[in-house]
Image: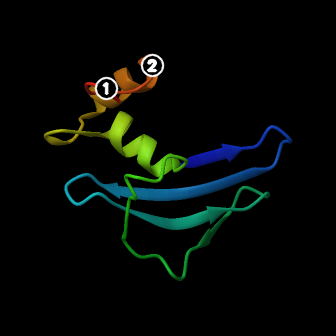
Amino acid sequence: TVVVRTEGGAENVSYEGMRCATGERKIYAFGRPDGTWSRNKYARWDLIEARRETSYHRELFFHYFCTVDGAANLKVIRHAIDNGGIRRGGD
């Protein structure tokens, strides 16, 4: 589940998946203000754009959920969240 909040208080909530092996992401559903979910009728696997620096998908993929060897295990992900990500040389 991803929650993106602006400084002004606007909020977007989505339920997403990520494939480390292929560098793809999918948005399954969108959160509603009442706490329910709206299924994404157009859900599909899309490539995560590595060159798009403003993408939260890029940040989560490269610095939190995926490692050089593929998907990180839960212990590695929790450590990354607590410590600002999995940084690789020069990132």
The spot of residue 8 in percent (x, y) is 86, 41
The residue that label 2 is drawn on is 82
The spot of residue 88 in percent (x, y) is 27, 27
Mark 1 Cα shell of 10 Å, populated few (<14), some (14-19), many (≥20): few
Which corner quadrant of the image does residue 76 belong to? top left
Outermost residue, left side: 69
Amino acid type for the residue under numbered disc 2: Asp
Which corner quadrant of the image does residue 47 belong to? bottom left
Q: Quadrant of the C terminus?
A: top left
The residue that label 1 is drawn on is 90
The spot of residue 49 in percent (x, y) is 40, 58
Up the image or down, 86 lies above or below 46; here it is above
Outermost residue, top side: 83
Up the image or down, 61 lies above or below 34; here it is above
Q: Is residue 41 left or right of residue 63?
A: right
Amino acid type for the residue under numbered disc 1: Gly
For the residue pair 70 and 28, the one nearer the viewer reads as: 70
For the residue pair 63 and 39, the one nearer the viewer reads as: 63
Local secondary structure at mark 2:
helix
**Mark with earlier residue (1, 2):** 2
The spot of residue 32 in percent (x, y) is 73, 62
Q: Is residue 57 left or right of residue 12?
A: left
